[in-house]
Amino acid sequence: MLLFYAISLLFGGCVIGLILLNNHSGNMTLNIHGVKSSTVAIGVFIGILAIIKARELIINVALKDSNILDICITLQGKKIHTKGFTDTGCQVTDTITGKPILLVEYETIKEILPQEIQNYYTTYDETIDLEIDKKIPDVNILKRVRFIPYNTVSTRKNSYLLCYQFDAIELFDEKDNHRIDRAYVGICKRKLSQNHEFQALINPKLLYMNGGF
C-alpha cells in the first residue's frame, strides 16, 4: 500500500509540476480544469523514468556491500562456474537490443565454447570480421555471434568484443539468484583481475533484467 501511494504521489507531482511550468500568466493558483491529456502523459512518463532511475540507484548502492557474485553459465548442457565483479563502470550493451553484456575471460569460458569458436578466437583481432562465414560455416553457430563495440583506457578506438549467445546465465548472491535466458557474453582475451579474485565483469543492468534482484 505504501508503494502504491508513493507512486501515485510521484506521478501526480510530475503532472502538477508540468502544469505550473506551462502557466504563463504568472498566477500560481493551480487550475486542474482543462488539463491537456498530453500534459498528463508526459507527467506519467517522467514518473516512470524516475522510478527506473531510483531502482538503479538503490541497486548500485546495495552492490557496494556485496559486489562479487557467483556465476553459472550454461551452453547445450555444459556449465561453468566462476565469479564476477559487479562494476558500475561496465556499460557494454548489445547495440541491436540494448541488453547488457556479461564480460568473461576467454580462458575461463573456452571449455564450453564450440570448437569452431575456439579455433576462430585464437586469431581474432577485435575488429568486425565481414568474412566470418568463410571461417565458421556452421550457420547455427553464426546465429549466436555478435560483434559489440567497446572502449577502455587501454584499448584503441573502434575495438569490438566477440560475443556469443549462451543458453542461460545465473547470478547468485547470499540470498537470491537471478537467471537470464539467451544472454550474450563478451569474450575477453585479457585478465580482468590481477589477483584472480574474479573472472567476469557484470553490467549492473543484468541484475534487474526480467525482474531480477
Image (cartoon, rainbow, N blue to C red):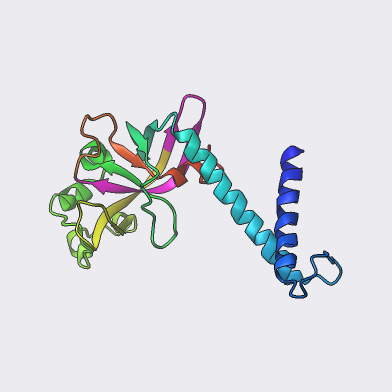
Relative placement, left or right, of 69 versus 55 is left
Q: State the image coordinates of residue 152 (x, y, percent, origin top left).
A: 26, 52
Magenta segment, prevailing SS (helix, strand or loop): strand
Say which quarter of the image contains residue 87. Answer: top left
Relative placement, left or right, of 199 versus 45 is left
Residue nearer the viewer, 16 or 86 = 16
In this picture, is 149 found above or below 21? Answer: above
Farthest residue, direction bottom:
25
Residue nearer the viewer, 130 or 156 = 156
Relative placement, left or right, of 116 versus 179 is left
Is residue 77 visible in the rendered image? The answer is no
> For residue 184: magenta?
yes
Q: State the image coordinates of residue 67 (x, y, percent, origin top left).
A: 40, 33
Specify the segment rendered in magenta. Answer: 170-189
Q: State the image coordinates of residue 31 (x, y, percent, origin top left).
A: 85, 67
In this picture, is 37 found above or below 180? Answer: below
> For residue 181: magenta?
yes
Residue at 38% over, 34% down: 72
Residue at 26% over, 43% down: 113
Say which quarter of the image contains residue 15. Answer: bottom right
Q: State the image coordinates of residue 107 (x, y, percent, origin top left).
A: 20, 38
> What quarter of the picture does the N terminus occupy?
top right
